[in-house]
Amino acid sequence: MSLAHRLPTLSAFLLLSSTAVADAEGTASQEAITRKLLWGDTHLHTANSFDAFLNANMTVKPDAAYRYAKGEPVVHAYNRTRVQIQTPLDFLVVSDHAEFFGGIRDIYYDGIQAEDPNLIESLLYWFNENEIRDAIDSGTGPEYFAHLLPVSEDPREAIKNWTERPETPGAEISFRNAWQELTEAAENHNAPGIFTTFMGWEWSSTPGGANLHRIIVSDADKQTATSFFPFSSLDSPYPEDLWQWLAKKEAETGVRFLSIPHNSNVSKGIMFDVTTARGNPIDTHYAKLRTRWEPVVEMTQIKGDSETHEAFSPEDEFARFEPFPFYLQNGTEPYVPRKGDYVRAALRTGLELEQQVGTNPFQLGMIGSTDSHTGLSTAEEPNFWGKFSRDSVPENKSDSALADGPSGWTMSASGLAAVWAGENTRDSIMDAFDRREVYATTGPRIQVRLFGGWQLTESDLADLTANGYAKGVPMGGSLGSNEGPEGGPAFLIQAMRDPMTANLDRIQIIKGWVDKTGSSHESVFNIAWAGDRTLDANGKLAAISDTVDRRTGSVSDHVGEAVLTTFWRDPVFDPSSSCFYYVRVLQIPTARHSLLDRIALGLENAGDYPDVIQERAYTSPIWYSKD
């Protein structure tokens, strides 16, 4: 039998949660036990992003993006149909590229807005304007965009060739107009307690095709946001310079900022390397700076999943999920997985570096987001509108969607940011990010609770939320010294299916630790599961049945569990070894968007793209430090 304590119905789960709050008064903080689960997207592009506009999103701007996220119908930029999210979001960050912000759109409609050009400049501007218009009107915008990408080379050599921001005719005017449009739309749609908007942008450093991109989230209101313009990689391609700018603006304005590394799986090993982008070994100052500004990471998104790769997790049968083996560059290059590309490896590297410099630079909470360039936050598998607007049409899914290689079917309908916050406001959501009480899903709204502590016992499952906060720490927290019974730390875990999708397969705990030599290791523990399966001698669990109907895409609800909840204590804990624990929840197999498109098109197959997917959730870790 499973180690899970199963609850029979959704209503039973809700009753458990509500009684925990009622019984907990005076035991745990009332604010903590009544935190709400909010769903959002921190990474969305509109027509103001140059690559979105070149790839057929010419009409969905910030106002429409917020309306779609709130549940209102909008008109699709490419196929011109009415589209609507299945389940509205609670918050949204519109995060257009700061580089050429609004520029391509303005050139297409209004030409280059340069002051007093001479004859030669006028001719050059006219040529560039018409070149861009021809590319967009002829449908060759993706090819034009590909030529704007960096040439493949060693990232650290490429970044050394960076020079100061070039003078770009009309860029400042476009930048100002686009930023004003975003701030006005965000202010108009922000409704505290109902729907929260954030003003943000993407800092898109891509030296030699290595993705070092960050999403910048601010809690600024419109008036404060107009006192600064977003910092871009044209200002500097180095993350340290970005953080320095954020610190300066925070001191000047009182605005809170958050920098979120994204899509690390194609960083050419630089995102979570042991040396900085400047090539210097990580020291204590850098580690503290990075921890200050980057408490969370985007674990999963449309351009693939960044949890781990089988090259670094060979014993994990669920590694290399939704791969995206393509670099963001002009020209192809074989994909080479590197430790610095993946979040689990980064968590392990962080433990190793902590032994050396005294601070863990990669103490990262986890979220998911889309990186959609359609202006539509679509992480719902059957309602996925693609990475770029052209991908909304199934016939286009086999075409190249980004430079050479990936297609619309390569893209993953992912992901979402789940936040445990006191209320649906900018301040409360930013607080949740800062304390890392957040998690990622690949699209489904799987509800997950994780608490760790020394004094937790199996009986605490009866009031999981109240006891978890009173006697332990939630996801994102750190454990102090052992104050409980003999043995390792204990954990309370609860997962509930998204009622709009499918049942759950299992809950796993992923543990990473450092040994006495300073080297890191990892283990995956199956701790709760559906059905009557049993663990084998190696702790492995047989795969759950695949019930996906290849003719319709439907899935049976007779497999899996709606709710899994369990107590687990680390059986191999060593108090002399620092470690982390995070939870991975797996859904039963469901239809991938490639199967749904194949069925709609009447095709026998969709090439090498899979028919099914095991969607999942990843919690932020809980850490233990020996010091």
Image (cartoon, helix red, strand yellow):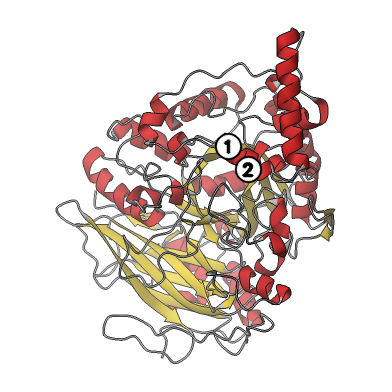
Which residue position holds label 2? Answer: 143
Q: Is residue 300 above or below residue 279?
A: below
Q: Position of residue 158 (x, y in %)?
A: 41, 30
User: Regarding mark 2 in the picture, which secondary structure is present there?
Assistant: helix
Q: Which mark is residue 245?
A: none
Q: Position of residue 42 (x, y in %)?
A: 61, 48
Give the quadrant of the N terminus: bottom left
User: Regarding mark 1 in the picture, which secondary structure is present there?
Assistant: helix
In the image, is 414 to the left or to the right of 241? right
Disc 2 vs disc 1: Cβ atoms closer than 8 Å? yes
Q: Is residue 80 above or below residue 109?
A: below
Q: Position of residue 215 (x, y in %)?
A: 56, 41
Q: For the residues marked 2 and 1, what is the alpha-carbon distance in whole angstroms?
A: 7 Å
For disc 2, the neighbor class at 10 Å (few under 14, some 14 to 19, many from 20) is: some
Q: Tell me how many marks there are.
A: 2
Does residue 89 appear in the picture of this structure? Answer: no
Q: Quadrant of residue 361?
A: top left
Q: Position of residue 201 (x, y in %)?
A: 62, 37
For image coordinates 82% across by 31% down, the residue present is 109
For image coordinates 46% across by 41% down, the residue present is 294
What amino acid type should be assigned to the residue bearing mark 1?
A: His
Does residue 123 appear in the picture of this structure? Answer: yes
For disc 1, the neighbor class at 10 Å (few under 14, some 14 to 19, many from 20) is: few
Which residue position holds label 1? Answer: 147
